[in-house]
Image (spheres, rainbow, N blue to C red):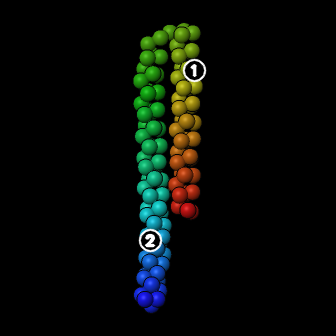
Amino acid sequence: MSKLMLTLMAGLFAMSVNGLAVAADAAKMDAKSMQAQAEGDYKAAKAKIKGDSEAAAAQCKKMTGAEKKTCKKDLEAKAKAAKADAKAAYDKAKADAKAMKKS
């Protein structure tokens, strides 16, 4: 009976070690897909910011004088803030993927 127990325990240990290796590989794949998703999201955000800025610039062109000047400054400020937010989200997602890869 003790040989049977030893054999079963050795088998369970081997399966658990193999399971850890499979889980580590899965985490690396998840980290890669997470980083790819982050890159795609960042590119999409930049494209949206560009499109929104172009649309707002078209509205600013219709204005005159101080109103037009204020519109352009607001446009630049909003675009700068949106780019900073997108970059921060991208950097965070990259850091999360890197941390996931290490664990």
Q: Which residue carries the number 1 mark?
A: 73
Q: Secondary structure at mark 1?
A: helix
Where residue 96 sits in the image (x, y, percent)?
A: 55, 52
Q: Nearer the viewer, mark 1 or mark 2?
A: 2
Residue 36 percent coordinates (x, y): 44, 53
Which residue is label 2 attached to?
A: 19
Which sits in the foreground, 85 or 70? 85
Answer few, some or many: residues within 10 Å of disc 1's Cα (few below 14, many 20 plus, some between 14 and 19). Answer: few
Query: What's the residue at 45%, 53% (across, down)?
Result: 34
Give the residue at x 43% y 64%. 26
Query: Closer to the camera, 13 or 56?
Result: 13
Q: Earlier in the sequence, mark 1 or mark 2?
A: 2
Q: Work out which quarter of the rendered image holds the C terminus and state it.
A: bottom right
Q: Amino acid at mark 1?
A: Lys
Is 30 rendered above or below residue 89?
below
Classed neighbour count for the residue bearing mark 2: other residues with Cα under 10 Å, few (<14), some (14–19), many (≥20): few
Q: What secondary structure is marked by label 2?
A: helix
Residue at image position (57%, 31%) is: 80
State the quadrant of the N terminus: bottom left
Q: Nearer the viewer, residue 31 or 47?
A: 31
